[in-house]
Amino acid sequence: MTVMDNTRPRTWEFTDVDTGQTRTITCTPWCNISHASDIAHPCLPSEISCISYDRANTAALPVACGHDAEDVYVMSALIEVDHFDPDPARRAPHAIVEIVQDHFTGALDPDGLQALIGLFEQRVAALRIRHAELVTARAEHQPQKEAQA
Ligand SMILES: [Zn+2]
């Protein structure tokens, strides 16, 4: 594996474990993961995704699912592109929203419920920002170009 370019967007070569073929990938400008494992080890192309976590704008809420409540992130949207996915919809930037089923808050009094409503309103505002970021990411999206054989 050779890191061809250390600036943004990063470009590197990796070995496709299925074919042994050397492939080239260019990370998206908005991606905020390191790709250290992708760069260091041969991998399946389908396992390489660029992801934008909304790290600066998250909210955790204590929820329970058959056990003691623990803080979990709620209503966070990731923007992702799966560069080599067979599904064209996944090769374009798309959002994944972290939503939870069968997880409940503790007993809320009216003030607690009001605070929860405020948090959900904040999360909806954050999702609107992520929506605008996704629209921009799709407008600027450049599909991966395969390395010359
Ligand atoms: Zn990336």
Image: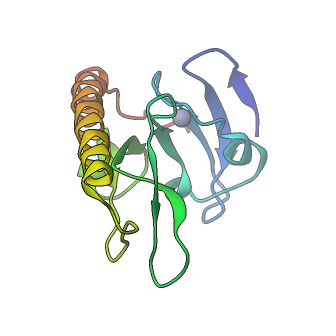
Q: How is the image coloured?
A: rainbow
Closer to the camera in the image, 142 or 128: 128
In-image side of 38 versus 127 (left or right) = right
In-image side of 57 versus 126 (left or right) = right
Residue 109 visible in the displayed image: yes
Name the residue at 76% across, 52% down: 41
Quadrant position of ligand 1: top right
73 shown above or below 122:
below
Image coordinates of residue 116 in percent, x first then y, are 30, 49
Image coordinates of residue 142 in percent, x first then y, are 34, 26
In-image side of 35 versus 53 (left or right) = right
Residue at the farthest bottom position = 66
Closer to the camera in the image, 11 or 64: 64
* Quadrant housing the C terminus: top right
Image coordinates of residue 122 in percent, x first then y, are 29, 34
Image coordinates of residue 68 in percent, x first then y, are 55, 76
72 shown above or below 125:
below
101 shown above or below 36:
below
Name the residue at 24% across, 31% down: 125
Closer to the camera in the image, 29 or 67: 67
- Name which quarter of the figure residue 120 lies in: top left
Name the residue at 29% across, 48% down: 111
* Quadrant housing the N terminus: top right
Closer to the camera in the image, 126 or 46: 126
Residue 148 visible in the displayed image: no
Please state the total of marks drawn on the protein image.
0
Name the residue at 67% across, 46% down: 38
